[in-house]
Amino acid sequence: MTYEQILCRRNGRVATIVLNRPEKLNAFTFRMLGEIHAALDVLLLDDLRALVFTGAGRAFSAGDDLIDMGGTEPAEDIRRGHHRLVTRLRGLRLPVVAALNGYTLGAAFDLALACDFRIAAADAELGDVRVPRAMCSMSGAAFWLPRMIGMAREASSRPPWRRSSGGCWRCHRARSAPRRHASNSAGHTTCQTRSSTSWAS
């Protein structure tokens, strides 16, 4: 199947879905979300061992594309797109890995939290930019973040709308920013991209 806004790859029993709008920092559209669901419909027919999400270019995803999102019925489009994707990933009986490079913001932060594991590159920046704009997190960040890192830790750490940078775990050159938020480990982009698939397999 041919897709316009994602790439779908197979390496043995590990499948990788690449968000592929690098000129827009892989910002989500309802078309992209529909293509992800279509890819999952095909991939999940096979006996996969793991599923990996990553982004093309210099970002995992900057979140929703507020200009070119598309759709005609926002509430229903969100239910069929974001909500269905998050609940679908949480219900899978195989590990789902988010290989995070560059910006992972807003709805992309929701997607990363919906995965079972997050491997962040050294240049990854995670956060929820919707909070200071009085926009609600509609796809899980407010629910999942305190449950993953603990309510007290979430409340005492820097606010989630201030982006948290990764450190370099794979190459043993730790950066100053603490890895205390939502990523399980961190590394340089090349190491992170290469290691996510091999680690998942």
Image (cartoon, rainbow, N blue to C red):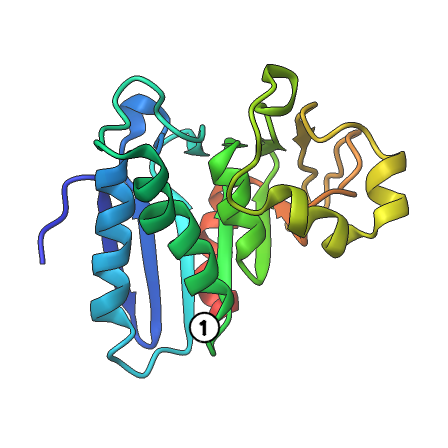
Query: Seen in the image, is 90 located left or right of residue 13?
Result: right
Element marked by disc 1: loop
Q: Which residue is mark 1?
A: 92
Residue 83 at x, y = what percent? 43, 50
- Residue 5 vs 143, above or below: the answer is above
- Residue 139 vs 165, above or below: the answer is below
Residue 171 appears in the rendering = no
How many dots with numbers?
1
The residue closer to the viewer here, 191 or 127, is 127
Tell me which corner region of the image, top left, top right, bottom left or bottom right, holds residue 124. top right
The residue closer to the viewer here, 87 or 198, is 87
Identify the residue shown where x is 75% and y is 32%.
Answer: 175
User: How many neighbours does mark 1 have within 10 angstroms: few (below 14), some (14-19), or many (20 or more)?
Assistant: few
Q: Dividing the image into 4 quarters, which one contains the N terminus?
A: bottom left
The residue closer to the viewer here, 133 or 187, is 133
Residue 51 at x, y = what percent? 40, 65
Query: Seen in the image, is 102 located left or right of residue 41?
Result: right
Q: Dividing the image into 4 quarters, which one contains the C terminus?
A: bottom left
Query: Seen in the image, is 165 located left or right of residue 99?
Result: right
Residue 134 at x, y = what percent? 61, 19
Residue 150 appears in the rendering = yes
Q: Check disc 1 and give the amino acid type.
A: Leu
